[in-house]
Image: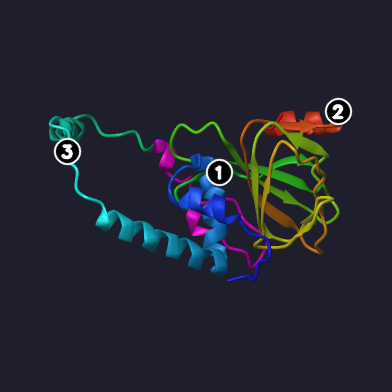
């Protein structure tokens, strides 16, 4: 695993383990945990603790109609799982990089050109989730125009690095930005930077160029 220095908070990991995050945000955290030994160990400890507490919880009688409802589901038409079916292979990554297994059940669209040295791919997660999940692939020196947020934005760096005016984020690092963050991510690495990002709400770009770019990618 890549050594990383920027992680989700303990509270955020607890929310992830307890299933309290929207699916779009949760998949970004899951990708981080997959690639971070420190967070994987912490999540494992949380899951073990939750399992022990569950075993100590006194049993509760099931609803009298629970079995009947379950049988009705089993006897009914098959569930629509098309949203959870991957496309015929995700788009290529820079040489030597591999896709996280946490994205195996996601639909990853082909790379779409949105500007010189800038490509975008929409990631669709199974279920009805309003969170927008996407990938950005930027060449060295390229940037996402300065913006703020109406909600939470989770970003996981898959390869390369960027600096957004607050900090440097390397491959494997995680960033949680919110409405109070106003930043301009610029690629710092010698090679391309690929990030997985989930946005709850919309991005608020400062410039006309940023707004046009955001509309092109469905982010503004």
As drawn, the label of residue 50 is none
- Quadrant in which the C terminus appears: top right
**174 with respect to 182 (left or right):** left
Disc 2 secondary structure class: helix
Please rate how many residues cluster around mark 1, counting C-alpha atoms within 10 Å: few if below 14, some from 14 to 19, many from 20: many
Instruction: Report the front residue among 148 and 144.
Output: 148
Part of the protein shown in magenta: 82-103
Q: Secondary structure at mark 3?
A: loop
**Mark-to-mark CA distance, 3 and 1:** 32 Å
Q: Residue at x 56, y 68 (%)?
A: 38
Residue 64 vs 109, above or below: the answer is above
Q: Quadrant of residue 160?
A: bottom right
Q: Are marks 2 and 1 in contact (CB under 8 Å)?
A: no
Along the viewing direction, whichever of 67 and 27 lies nearer the viewer: 67
Question: Which mark, residue 62?
Answer: 3
Residue assigned mark 1: 25
Alpha carbons under labels 2 and 3: distance apart:
57 Å
Task: Residue under label 2, please give it.
Answer: 208
Left or right placement of residue 162 versus residue 46 in this view: right
Which of labels 3 and 1 is toward the front? Answer: 3
């Amino acid at each position: 695993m890549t050594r990383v220095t920027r992680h989700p908070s303990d509270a955020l990991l607890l929310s992830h383990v307890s299933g309290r995050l929207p699916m779009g945000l949760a998949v970004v955290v899951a990708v981080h945990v997959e690639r971070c030994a420190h967070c994987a160990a912490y999540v494992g400890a949380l899951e073990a603790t939750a399992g022990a507490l569950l075993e100590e919880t006194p049993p509760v009688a099931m609803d009298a109609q629970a079995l009947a409802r379950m049988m009705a589901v089993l006897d009914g038409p098959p569930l629509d799982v098309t949203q959870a079916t991957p496309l015929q292979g995700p788009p290529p990554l820079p040489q030597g990089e591999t896709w996280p297994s946490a994205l195996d059940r996601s639909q990853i669209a082909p790379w779409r050109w949105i500007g010189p040295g800038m490509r975008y791919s929409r990631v669709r997660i199974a279920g009805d989730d309003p969170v927008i999940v996407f990938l950005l692939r930027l060449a060295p020196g390229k940037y996402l125009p300065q913006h703020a947020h109406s909600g939470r934005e989770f970003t996981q760096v898959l390869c390369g690095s960027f600096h957004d005016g607050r900090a440097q984020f390397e491959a494997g690092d995680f960033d949680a930005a919110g409405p109070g963050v106003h930043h301009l991510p610029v690629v710092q690495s010698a090679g391309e930077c690929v990030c997985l990002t989930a946005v709850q709400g919309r991005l608020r770009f400062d410039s006309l160029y940023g707004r046009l770019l955001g509309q092109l990618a469905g982010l503004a």
